[in-house]
Amino acid sequence: MVEKGVEIAPASGKLGILLVGLGAVSTTFVAGVEAIRKGTAKPIGSLTQMGTIRLGKRTDNRSPKIKDFVPLADLNDIVFGAWDIFPDSAYDAALHAGVLEKSLIEDLREQLDSLKPMAAVFSQHYVKRLNGTNVKTGKNKMELAEQIIEDIARFKAEKGCERLVIVWAASTEIFLEKSAVHQTIEAFEKGLYDDDEQIAPSMIYAYAALKSGVPFANGAPNLSVDIPALTHLAEQNNVPICGKDFKTGQTLMKTIIAPGLKSRMLGLDGWYSTNILGNRDGEVLDDPESFKTKEESKLSVLEHILQPEVYPELYKDFSHVVRINYYPPRGDNKEGWDSIDIFGWLGYKMQIKIDFLCRDSILAAPLCLDLALFLDLAQRAGMKGIQEWLSFYFKAPQTAPELYPEHDIFIQLMKLKNTLRHLKGEDLITHLGLEYYD
Ligand SMILES: NC(=O)c1ccc[n+]([C@@H]2O[C@H](COP(=O)([O-])OP(=O)(O)OC[C@H]3O[C@@H](n4cnc5c(N)ncnc54)[C@H](O)[C@@H]3O)[C@@H](O)[C@H]2O)c1
């Protein structure tokens, strides 16, 4: 039986994607979209562009591309904007990031040079290792939020955008815990006027986005929009939000492998993960306070997938260690090692070693694209507040307070695709399959 589906406004006109932070991830994302638009590259790694979705029974042979199934913004309708604490254009920032070959960057010079960042809301208190000059000043944090709200409105008008989405791809801030000022919209707004130290710049951007009715995705592990005051504001203003921390590299591998071990009831004694990377993100994460934010995000994954409380004989008290070492020669080409100690039948021990020579920003860029397009879709479909169906993209998925996050990447993908089927009034796929044998 096909349900009715949800009314979705068409994706007409331009979609502005505003990036907080114009560093390695953002410039790799922008350059990639420009190269795809020119026809010199393919959108590899992007589910919205390359993925298909099965509809109906396996015998129906209906598997359209996701972008042909739900009305997503066309890549040619995207306009980019950004904020950064450094005034470099996307061209200079891409050269500095050192992710892409110089020849590719030169090929896109005109497009990249035209993207110049607006002045940022920043304080070194929250990111100790950086210091830039392209920074706003104001008499309090509320005034800074108002300046971001003005930036958003000006960008929309100047670029003639129908709709906007904001993606946080700026540096990881120091670890903050949810406190009283984060609990209600009123307390948060008072905190903005009082310059409360518990309100980080990322929360100021998120507040400005929600006040402007603009969806917000948080690609870093800092709290940002993951506080009750802002989730309430998102619901109140009918704005979809999601986070936290793009799931790339080592954690991506973890959420692919751990569900497989658990599905075969193989036990785990320990999982040791270490990384070396030498980009600016690595430098920021070299500061213990920023690393703590990242560590919390990376550590939560295995506990939730393996459920030691349900399977104590297999997963009680396993040791899980995560390290990130700043090692400049590697640049953006991170190396992630995992040493996994497992046990099987009769308790016999085995080991798995992974050495993932990955490219952080190459893995993250398509996630920026998908998140921007899906959040825009969500808004046009009348969805608001936390978008748990986008957990697929995050290391520490944001969920309703009473729920634990779903980390298993295969369940996340099923959730995402079933949400799209639901939006379009198609049957959800359960994989039961008994009907083929009736
Ligand atoms: N690359 C990945 O695989 C990956 C995965 C998960 C999360 N992340 C997160 O994404 C973020 C971006 O990563 P990156 O490699 O591009 O880092 P990067 O250091 O190259 O870029 C971050 C940029 O943000 C800017 N910035 C810092 N604070 C700002 C502020 N308050 N306002 C505006 N700009 C600000 C910095 O100047 C810098 O240009 C980091 O937080 C990182 O932890 C990246």
Image (spheres, rainbow, N blue to C red):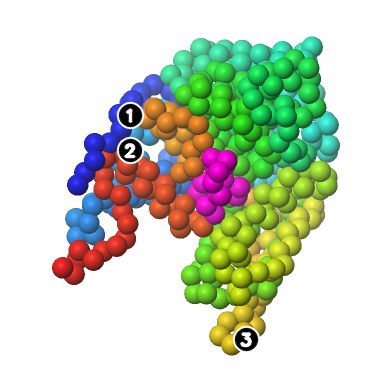
Query: Which one is earlier in the sequence, the residue at label 1 or at label 3?
Result: 1
Magenta part of the protein: which range? 390-407
Let me know if residue 207 appears in the view. Answer: yes
* Residue 340 rendering spot, x and y as whole percentages: 66, 72
Q: Give SS at disc 1.
A: loop
- The reply to whether the magenta stretch includes residue 411 is no
| Residue at 77% from the left image edge and 47% from the top image edge | 292
Q: Quadrant of residue 174?
A: top right
Q: CA distance from mark 2 to mark 1?
A: 8 Å
The correct choice, above or below, for 246 with respect to 21 in the image is below
* Residue situated furthest left in the rendering: 438
Task: Name the disc covering residue 390, or none.
Answer: none
Task: Name the disc covering residue 423, or none.
Answer: 2
- The reply to whether the magenta stretch includes residue 400 is yes
Q: Residue 288 versus residue 226: which sits nearer the camera?
A: 226
* Residue 77 rendering spot, x and y as whole percentages: 42, 27
Task: Name the disc covering residue 8, or none.
Answer: 1
Q: Give SS at disc 2.
A: helix
Q: CA distance from mark 3 to mark 2?
A: 47 Å
Q: What's the residue type where badge 1 is placed?
A: Ile
Query: Which one is earlier in the sequence, the residue at label 2 or at label 1?
Result: 1
